[in-house]
Image (cartoon, rainbow, N blue to C red):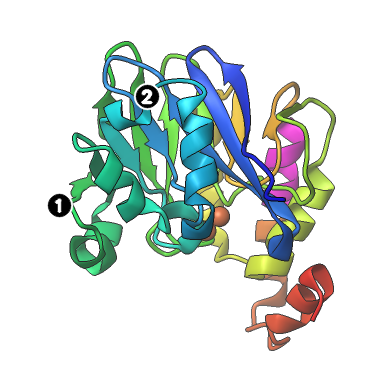
């Protein structure tokens, strides 16, 4: 039997819609901001669209969605975009200029809008500030900061494996960095440090990643652990020639 999406309110008007993806041994999270002009951040995988839609529908009528924010162009962040757009007639896809120009302008069934760095998407009572974070995992990536709740939607930064609870307060920074390293290798130092600087300066109350639990409580260990990871790239100063598939095989099997 298929597992349903898990739905949890993690902050005011802010819901985590989470499906478990066995091949990755992690959850795929969408975040719904219920407001005058409701927005969802990330769409989830196409194959889990019906579960995600049903999860959204537990909170509000998803046909009312006004914005679909795509953090970067990958299947878990936008695989279900067109399914969603077909059922939500007023929803506009929003993404970085890079994502729009190189991918969404062609792939999306409705014209997307490119959002500039630092631009705020006004949903009514929430303002969602979009910050470019290129080469932190994906070259076209953004993170989204809710200026009202100070929740930071960090996509593939700060994720963790496993089914996870909706919110955790204990320190999972080591396992988070390990997952990041396994999937993406070491990111370019300057870009990761810049993204961390920008995120920290927003003084987040919560980090809401695309995989695993939302993180609350003392977030300093996460920033520290990812800064150490950034330093590792500098220490090696050469290209890591280990095939990326090696650590991935260990994580997902095969
Ligand atoms: Fe991704
Ligand atoms: Fe992801």
In the structure shown, which secondary structural element does the residue marked by tag 1 occupy? loop
Q: Earlier in the sequence, mark 1 or mark 2?
A: 2
Name the residue tied to disc 1.
Answer: 111
What span is colored magenta in the figure?
A: 220-228
Which label was assigned to residue 61? 2
Q: Quadrant of the C terminus?
A: bottom right
Circles 1 and 2: CB atoms closer than 8 Å: no
Using the image, determine if residue 81 lies above or below residue 65: below
Q: Is residue 118 magenta?
A: no
Q: Residue at x 53, y 33 (%)?
A: 55
Q: Nearer the viewer, residue 142 or 25?
A: 25
1 sits left or right of 146 in the view: right
236 sits left or right of 60 in the view: right
Visible in this render: residue 13? Answer: yes
Q: Residue at x 51, y 41 (%)?
A: 52
Q: Position of residue 106 (x, y in %)?
A: 20, 67
């Amino acid at each position: 039997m298929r597992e349903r999406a898990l739905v949890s309110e993690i902050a005011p008007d802010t819901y985590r819609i989470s499906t478990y993806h066995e091949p990755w041994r992690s959850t795929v999270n969408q975040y719904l901001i219920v407001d005058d002009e409701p927005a969802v951040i990330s769409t989830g995988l196409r194959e889990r669209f019906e579960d995600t839609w049903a999860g959204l529908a537990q909170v509000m009528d998803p046909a009312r969605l006004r914005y679909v924010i795509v953090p970067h162009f990958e299947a878990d962040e936008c695989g279900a975009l067109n399914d969603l757009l077909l059922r939500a007639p007023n929803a506009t896809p929003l993404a970085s200029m890079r994502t729009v120009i190189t991918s969404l302008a062609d792939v999306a069934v409705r014209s997307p809008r490119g959002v500039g760095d630092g631009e705020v998407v006004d949903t009514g009572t929430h303002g969602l500030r979009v910050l470019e974070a290129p080469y932190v995992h994906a070259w076209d990536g953004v993170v989204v900061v809710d200026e009202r709740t100070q929740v930071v939607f960090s996509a593939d930064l700060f994720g963790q494996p496993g089914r996870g609870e909706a919110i955790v307060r204990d320190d999972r920074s080591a396992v988070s960095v390990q997952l990041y390293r396994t999937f993406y290798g070491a990111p370019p130092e300057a870009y990761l440090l810049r993204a961390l600087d920008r995120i920290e300066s927003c003084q987040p109350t919560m980090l809401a990643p695309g995989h695993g639990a939302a993180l609350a409580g003392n977030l300093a260990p996460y920033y520290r652990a990812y800064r150490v990871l950034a330093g590792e790239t500098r220490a090696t100063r050469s290209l890591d020639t280990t095939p990326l598939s090696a650590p991935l095989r260990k994580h997902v099997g095969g």
